Amino acid sequence: MTRNIGKMWEKYCLRPTQGSVSTIPVFVYGTAWKKERSADLVYNAIKAGFRGVDTAAQPRHYQEHLVGDGIRRAIADGIVGRADLYVQTKYSPISAQDPANMPYDPSATVTDQVHASIKSSLYNLRSKVDPDSVDEAYIDTVIIHSPLSTLAQTLEAWHALETYVPRHIRNLGISNCTLPILRELCTSPQTTVKPSVVQNRFYEETLFDVPLRAFCRENQVIYQSFWTLTANPDLVCSEPVQQLAHQVNITPAAAFYTLVMALEDVAVLNGTKDESRMKEDLSAPKQVEHFTQKQPELWQHILTGFRGMIGEST
């Protein structure tokens, strides 16, 4: 069942975790490869209307401390309060790190790696400039960036993250994940905090994760799509996407994003650096909502066609 609250395609309720209930916007701003521009781009994204930010404790591809700078600046300028934002980061295993620059000792146990990673993330993503404010800092979701080399190690990392819930971490998730691993995390009696989020590439190589997304819907897990535009140029040019773009007068990219969201319980990472694109993309769901109300049959025709193109039955 879709867990939209408020307006269509605005945000979802996440799985209640130990008394903590939080929401996730359908658009989350992605900060990979933003380098020294990370702070300014995050600030601009929040100013444009993004209320979700994704980063990682992985200096190879993310500048988590600069992401935090951008968030703190937006809060200090009164654009948002911390409670208005969904902030998400990742524990990245050794295999995903630059050996010369990682947030933990690679010779440490997985448990100690996680603790060191979370310590640095809480500091980087605190909402106030004062370093002492880290004790009141929290992160909405922490994701394991990819399964570790064994299931036992993945579970060890998961158990270490569970110790922070709900005070410093509100929800847990996993990225680059297959269905068997997700099923284990959701059903294992060893896990006390179940996954709230799965962040995966949405592309043909994984058959668009049709079975995994079905499992997510059945188990209160939000699916986060990344690499959405980059991996799917043919879909962006497809008839259903082009038809929706024409009918609603939005860009094909924005139309594609909204169709992915319409697959139910799907949030989308969006990493555009262009401020006008930010606003165009953020306004698209509301425009599509109006279209679905005015022309529901045509909308269903377009959505059914899109589902068919990715091998998903209605």
Image: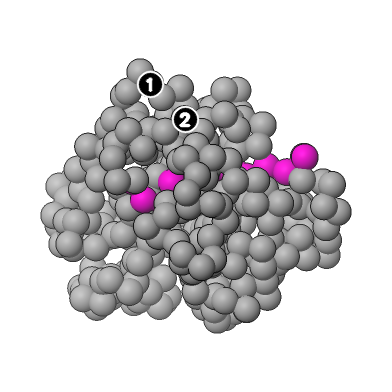
Nearer-the-camera pick, 296 or 170: 170
Q: SS of the residue at dot 2?
A: helix
* Lower position in the chain sequence, tag 2 or tag 1: 2
The range drawn in magenta is 135-147
Judge whether 289 appears above or below 160 on screen: below
Can see residue 278? yes
Can see residue 172? no
Task: Name the residue that disc number 1 marks.
Answer: 190
Q: SS of the residue at dot 1?
A: loop
Q: CA distance from mark 2 to mark 1?
A: 8 Å
Task: Name the residue that disc number 2 marks.
Answer: 159
> Mark 2, residues whose alpha carbon is within 10 Å: few (<14), some, or many (≥20)?
some
Residue 272 lies, in percent from the top left, at 50, 75
In the rendered structure, does residue 144 fall within the stretch colored magenta? yes
- Image point 76% across, 60% down: which residue? 72
Residue 54 lies, in percent from the top left, at 53, 58
